[in-house]
C-alpha cells in the first residue's frame, strides 16, 4: 500500500492519522468539506502538511468522492457529523449514507482498495455493561428524563432495583441510545456487510473519548478537556453535569493514530471492530481536578444539578481485543491534559466557546435542570 485517502483528514483524529501516515512513508490525500463548527472558516488548517493533497468536498457528493478514491490503495473514513443537537437526520445523511456511498463507488468502479478503516465510537454501547450483585451482567437502558429530573443518576438493576457497578464493555454488546450512536452503528453494519460481501478488507474502530491538540474549540461535543480548560483559562469555574461522578476513559489522539495504522497494516484485524480506549476510568470531578492542577488554578468544577439528556452515566471500554494485536495506550491522563493545556494556551482568540453551545442546548432541551 502506498497511497491512502483520509476522509475528514483536516479534523482532529484525521490530521494526527495523516501525520503518522506521512512519517511511515505513505502518500496522503484528504477529502474534507472543512465544515463548521470544526472549521469556522472553510480554509485548510495550518497544521495540515504541505505534501498532503487536499480535496475540499463532501462525502455525500458522489462525483467528488469518486475523484478522491481514484488511485488510492486504502481509505481511512473518519469524516462524520457529531453533536448533541436534535437535527437527527443529519447524522444519518453524513455518517450512514456517506459510508454506503464509499462502498457503492468502490464496487461500481471496481477500485482496487486493499483496506477501509472507519471510525465508529464507544457511543454504540449506550450505557454499556453493569454488574448486579444478584443478577450478574446487565445492559441497562437509557435513563429517562424523569429519572434525571429526580436526580436518580446511578443505574439500578432492572430485575431487583439494587444499584449496579459499571464494568468495562467489550465489543460484543451494542446498544446505541442516540442518533449519533445509531448512525455510528449503522456505519458498522454497512461497512462490515459490504466489505465482506465484496472482499474489501474493512475494520471498524470504536474510539473512546479522544483528547489532544487540534481538537476544535467551537463544537459542542469536543468535550471535557476543552470545556474545562477554556473555562478555567477564562477565570470561570466549569459546570460538571449530574453529580460529577460519571466514569469515563480517555485516550490520547496519537495513541488513536497508532491504533489506526496498526489495523491498516495488520490483516488479522480484517472484518472486525475494536475498542480503542484509555484503559483507566476516572470521574468527571477527578478530571476537573487534574485540569485545575495542570493550570495551577484554585477553580474547581461546580455541580449545579444540571444534566445533559442522552448522556450515559458511566462508560468504560475493555481494550483486550486490540491489546492482543500488540497495541497499548502510551499516554497517561496527566500527560494528555498537559499536552492539551499547552496547545490550547498557545491558541489566539481563546474564548469561552462553550457558552453559546450550552445556551443553545438549554434552549432545545438537551441541557436541563434537576429538581
Ligand atoms: N473525537 C472523539 O472523541 C471521537 C470519539 C469516537 C469516535 N469519533 C469518530 O472519529 C472520527 C473523527 O472524529 P474527530 O473528533 O476527528 O472529528 P472532527 O470533527 O475533528 O473531524 C471531522 C472532519 O470531518 C469533516 N467532515 C464533516 N462532515 C463532512 C462531510 N460531510 N464531508 C467531508 N468532510 C466532512 C470535518 O470538516 C472535519 O474536518 C469521526 O467519525 C467521529 O465520529 C471521534
Image (cartoon, rainbow, N blue to C red):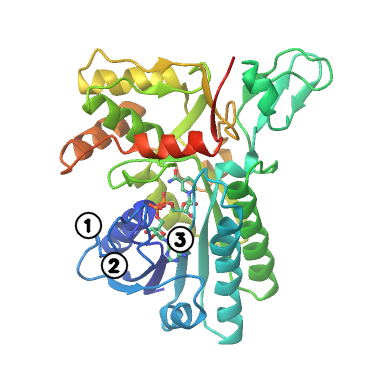
Give the residue number, with chain letter if any, for mark 3. 79
Label 3 crowd bin: few (<14), some (14–19), many (20+), radius 10 Å: many
Where disc 3 sits, the SS reads: loop
Give the residue number, with chain letter if any, for mark 1. 47
Ligand 1 visible in quadrant: bottom left
Residue drawn 37% across and 74% down? 3
Mark 3 in CB contact with mark 2 (< 8 angstroms):
no
Label 2 crowd bin: few (<14), some (14–19), many (20+), radius 10 Å: few
Where disc 1 sits, the SS reads: loop
Give the residue number, with chain letter if any, for mark 2. 25
**198 shown above or below 291:** below
Residue drawn 26% across and 65% down? 43
Q: Earlier in the sequence, mark 2 or mark 1?
A: 2
Residue 180 percent location from the top left of the image: 58, 49
Residue 323 percent location from the top left of the image: 51, 41
Mark 1 in CB contact with mark 3 (< 8 angstroms):
no
Residue 163 percent location from the top left of the image: 70, 14
Quarter of the image that includes the C terminus:
top right
Amino acid at each position: 500500500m502506498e497511497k491512502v485517502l483520509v476522509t475528514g483528514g483536516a479534523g482532529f483524529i484525521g490530521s494526527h492519522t495523516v501525520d503518522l501516515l506521512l512519517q511511515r512513508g505513505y502518500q496522503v490525500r484528504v477529502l474534507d468539506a472543512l465544515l463548521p463548527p470544526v472549521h469556522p472558516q472553510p480554509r485548510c488548517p495550518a497544521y495540515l502538511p504541505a505534501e498532503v493533497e487536499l480535496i475540499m468536498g463532501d462525502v455525500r457528493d458522489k462525483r467528488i468522492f469518486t475523484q478522491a478514491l481514484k488511485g488510492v490503495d486504502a481509505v481511512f473514513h473518519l469524516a462524520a457529523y457529531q453533536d448533541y443537537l436534535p437535527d437527527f437526520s443529519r447524522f444519518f445523511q453524513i455518517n450512514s449514507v456517506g459510508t454506503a456511498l464509499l462502498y457503492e463507488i468502490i464496487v461500481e468502479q471496481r477500485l482496487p482498495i486493499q483496506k477501509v478503516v472507519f471510525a465508529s465510537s464507544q457511543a454504540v454501547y449506550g450505557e454499556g455493561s453493569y454488574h448486579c450483585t444478584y443478577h450478574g451482567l446487565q445492559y441497562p437502558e437509557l435513563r429517562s428524563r424523569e429519572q434525571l429530573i429526580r436526580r436518580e443518576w446511578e443505574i439500578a438493576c432492572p430485575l431487583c432495583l439494587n444499584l449496579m457497578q459499571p464494568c468495562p464493555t467489550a465489543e460484543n454488546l451494542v446498544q446505541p441510545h442516540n442518533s449519533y450512536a445509531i448512525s455510528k452503528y449503522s456505519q458498522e453494519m454497512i461497512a462490515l456487510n459490504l466489505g465482506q460481501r465484496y472482499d474489501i478488507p474493512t475494520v471498524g474502530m470504536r474510539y473512546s473519548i479522544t483528547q489532544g491538540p487540534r481538537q476544535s474549540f467551537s463544537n459542542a461535543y469536543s468535550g471535557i478537556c476543552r470545556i474545562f480548560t477554556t473555562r478555567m483559562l477564562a477565570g470561570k469555574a466549569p459546570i460538571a453535569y449530574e453529580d460529577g461522578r460519571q466514569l469515563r476513559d480517555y485516550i490520547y489522539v496519537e495513541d488513536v493514530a497508532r491504533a489506526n495504522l496498526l489495523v491498516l497494516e495488520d490483516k488479522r484485524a480484517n472484518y472486525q471492530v475494536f475498542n480503542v480506549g484509555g484503559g483507566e476510568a476516572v470521574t468527571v470531578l477527578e478530571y476537573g481536578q487534574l485540569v485545575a492542577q495542570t493550570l495551577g488554578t484554585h477553580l474547581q468544577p461546580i455541580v449545579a444539578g444540571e444534566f445533559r439528556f442522552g448522556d450515559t452515566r458511566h462508560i468504560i471500554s475493555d481494550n483486550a481485543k486490540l491489546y492482543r494485536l500488540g497495541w497499548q495506550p502510551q499516554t497517561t491522563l496527566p500527560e494528555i491534559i498537559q499536552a492539551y493545556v499547552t496547545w490550547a494556551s498557545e491558541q489566539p482568540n481563546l474564548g469561552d466557546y462553550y457558552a453559546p453551545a450550552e445556551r443553545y442546548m438549554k434552549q432545545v432541551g438537551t441541557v436541563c435542570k434537576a429538581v
